[in-house]
Amino acid sequence: MRKFPFSAQILLGLVLGAALGFLAREGDLSWLASTLDTVGGLFVQLLKLAVPPLVFTAIVVSVVSLRGVANAARLALKTLLWFGVTALIAVSLGIGIGLLTDPGRGVSLDVGGATAPKTTGSWTDFLTGIVPTNPVGAFVEGNVLQIVFLALVVGAAALLVGAAAEPFVALNRAVLAIVQKALWWVIRLAPIGTLGLIGHAVAAYGWDLLAPLAKFTTAVYVGCAIVLFVVYPLLLVTAGRLNPLRFFAGAWPAIELAFVSRSSVGTMPVTQRSVERLGVPREYASFAVPFGATTKMDGCAAIYPALAAIFVAQVFGVDLGIGDYLLIAFVSVVGSAATAGLTGAIVMLTLTLSTLGLPLAGAGLLLAIDPILDMIRTATNVAGQAVVPTIVAAREGILDRDAYANAGRRDLTDADETDADEAADRPARRDDLAPAPA
């Protein structure tokens, strides 16, 4: 299997999983459907298990290694700026597609039976959610945003303490190397995990469930596909002077895994490895990717809530005006940070609906097909989380363009594993993020 490309392994798992899922559904084989669900669930649990220690140790080590680097603040600012720019483009497309397709017109649904989701979004969630009540709780709950906050504080403190903190920094480097080694064992199971995840999705959701919402589902998939395969490539060409085909060759394993796992956080280790494989410096990638995994959601927080808000308004007979569409754009660009510590798309949708004054029960109408929608949403999220650091690195002159050009020629689970082990042990250099000479 090591001679069989990783992307091809995942594709094979997807095809076999879809076939087994279809067999389980058509043959009413509950034991097969249950087995597929268990296999896929265990794989996602294993991925998420590695996330807290990986995020914390990677950021602590990275903060310390940034000692003497003058452009670190500029990198962070430009990353946030590009997060906002791409989110604005995505939500604009979502609104445009919604106006063109009218996804809620003529839909026959039991509006009276719809109930609001138990979890809803709030503008105060970001402020109250970023600081944990206790440090242990953040790790136990797997709250990535809180872990990022703790790691930034601890890393900055270790940086200021200096030599006295070196034993602590050395411990973090050692833990990081151990977690990365264990993580690659899990990542090699991705084809099996893909088989279980896609198989369960096919077994659980059929056309009879999707038919009443087919227009809306199609609109979401088309919108995400345009962002994924048109907007991102155009930005890579115009803003980064980069070949989009090389980007997809390097980032495709993360995009594939995001599609089947439906978890940006669970995919984050693969996303970070893919970004580094594209030539983005590890010190910068370890900041941008974890932060993007919690706040950069072009699928869940831009395209989907825009289309869903238009859908809900049309189903409930509410006319939206120019001001309402501007509110949707504002919520999508700014509000994703307010839901970073919570469950993505549903919370983001309820935040959008409440801001517009639309019934929160409208979100309940879409819960039945949410897993199907979440697949393409998450793939779009992860692609955006890889695109932005790549563009910023290219514009700042710190992208390894030779690595970028050859990203697709190295298998994710082969050469990169050795690279990761060596990088985790290398000493910090003052010029790791120094811009390349003009």
Image (tube, helix red, strand yellow):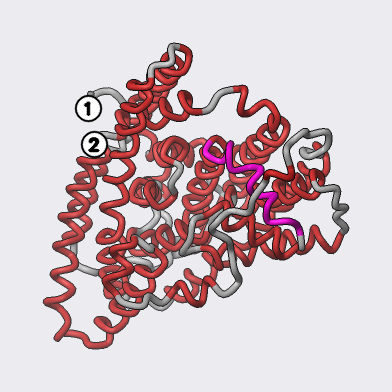
Please say if 176 is above or below 406.
below
Q: Residue furthest front?
A: 113
| Residue occupying the point 29% across, 66% down | 56
- Look at the numbered discs 2 and 1 and tell me whether their residues touch, using CB distance below 8 Å: yes
323 shown above or below 280 = below
Range drawn in magenta: 358-371
**In terms of secondary structure, where does tag 1 sit?**
loop
Q: Position of residue 32 (x, y in %)?
A: 34, 21
Is residue 360 positioned above or below 226 on the image?
below
The answer to which quarter of the image holds residue 175 is: bottom left
Residue 327 percent coordinates (x, y): 76, 64
Quick one: quadrant of the N terminus? top left
Q: Nearer the viewer, residue 270 or 14?
A: 14
The residue located at (40%, 50%) in the rendering is 275
- Tell which circle, 2 or 1, labels the residue nearer the N-terminal end: 1
Work out whether residue 405 can be spotted. Answer: no
State the mark number for residue 2: 1
Q: Which residue is mark 2?
A: 414
- Specify whether residue 368 is painted magenta: yes
Q: Quadrant of residue 350?
A: bottom right
Q: How far across and how far down the image is residue 372, in percent?
A: 55, 35
Question: Of the numbered discs in the image, which one, if any, rests on residue 129?
Answer: none
Q: Is residue 123 left or right of residue 403?
A: right
* Residue at left offset 67%, top offset 40%: 223
User: Callout 2, which amino acid?
Assistant: Asp
Label 2 secondary element: loop
Query: Marks 2/1: CA distance?
Result: 8 Å
Q: Amino acid at mark 1?
A: Arg
Query: 128 above or below 245?
Result: below
Q: Is residue 327 magenta?
A: no
Taken as a whole, is the magenta stretch helix, strand or loop?
A: helix
